[in-house]
Amino acid sequence: MFGYVKPIMERLSEEEKNLFSSYYCGLCRAMGRKSRFTLSYDCAFLALILSKGEDGGSCAIRCKGNPFRKKQAAQTPVLSYCADVGTILSYHKVLDDIADEGGLRKRAAKWILKSDYKKAAKRSPKAAACIQKYTAELNRLEKERCPVSDMAADTTAKMMGELAGEEGSVLYRLFYHIGRWLYLMDAMEDYEADAERGGYNVLRLEWNSKEEAIGAMEFALWHALSVVEGCLQAIELTKTARGVAENVLYKAMSARTHLTLYGQEERKEVGSL
């Protein structure tokens, strides 16, 4: 479920592009040396929203991937928290992959991430406990072969909501529905792959065919995005940050939903840094 929440870079203004890039670079800078390979757009977006788009005065850094080129990196304290969240989520994703598939590469990734994971969990114990709680709950539902998509999606939704804010807050509601959209989109996109390998997919258990699943998810996915749109309007952001957020939530996530549900060729619009 990583990499879904990202902007269409070609549709950002130069100022918006620079702001999001500074958060992405700032997040990379805040992560541990070994965990940087798990860097995600999702956590950069979380940091952008939680900090209201105020970058704390960006600084010029040399990119680890391209040391001959300097980049601007945001310095807001929220980035440290979001870096920890990204590291903890990635570690649990590796554990889940090992349980599902095994393999030396996954076990090596676990070994590489373990020290940074322990440090992140110590710095952000509340986030670590939240992720542990809902990951365990999702694993339980998977083992029981839960056939109810609302129950399965609710685990990721609650986890994302709690990582962003207190229950009942607009931040919680925003990321709750982002989390719900993330889980259901992942299940839709992995429908055939899970069928081939016999993996758990709640939509395959709940509906008799992919066509029936698409019909049900059409309402669920668009409803989640409509709630997200309403929540964003109530959140305080700088003008530039709001432009980035609207690009991600209104354009990029909508384009991906269209592509998954209807097969429209919109994936090419999803840009990269």
Image (tube, helix red, strand yellow):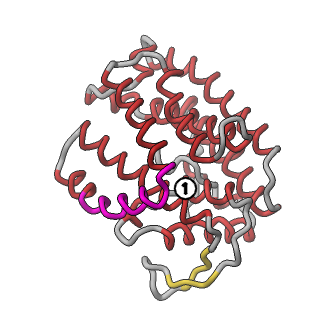
In percent of width and height, residue 93 lies at 36, 46
Q: Where is residue 46 in the image (x, y as percent from the top left)?
A: 61, 54
Q: Residue at x 45, y 81 (%)?
A: 66
Specify the amino acid type for callout 1.
Cys
Task: In the rendered view, tell whether residue 95 sits above or below residue 226.
Answer: below
Residue stretch in magenta: 111-126
Which residue in the rendered view is the most extreme toward the top? 208
Residue 112 among those drawn in magenta? yes
Q: How many marks do you count on the picture?
A: 1
Point out the image quarter for the C terminus.
bottom right
In this picture, is 66 found above or below 133?
A: below
Q: Is residue 82 left or right of residue 110?
A: right
SS for tag 1?
Answer: helix
Question: Is residue 142 depicted above or below 28 in this figure?
Answer: above
Residue 151 placement, left or right of 247: left
The residue drawn where x is 38% and y is 72% is: 33
Q: Who's the residue at 60% across and 36% down the image?
A: 257
In this picture, residue 16 sits left or right of residue 117: right
Image quadrant in which you'd find residue 226: top right
Q: Provide residue 152's location: percent of width, then percent of height.
A: 47, 25
Question: Going 72% across and 40% down the picture, which residue do you hit?
Answer: 169
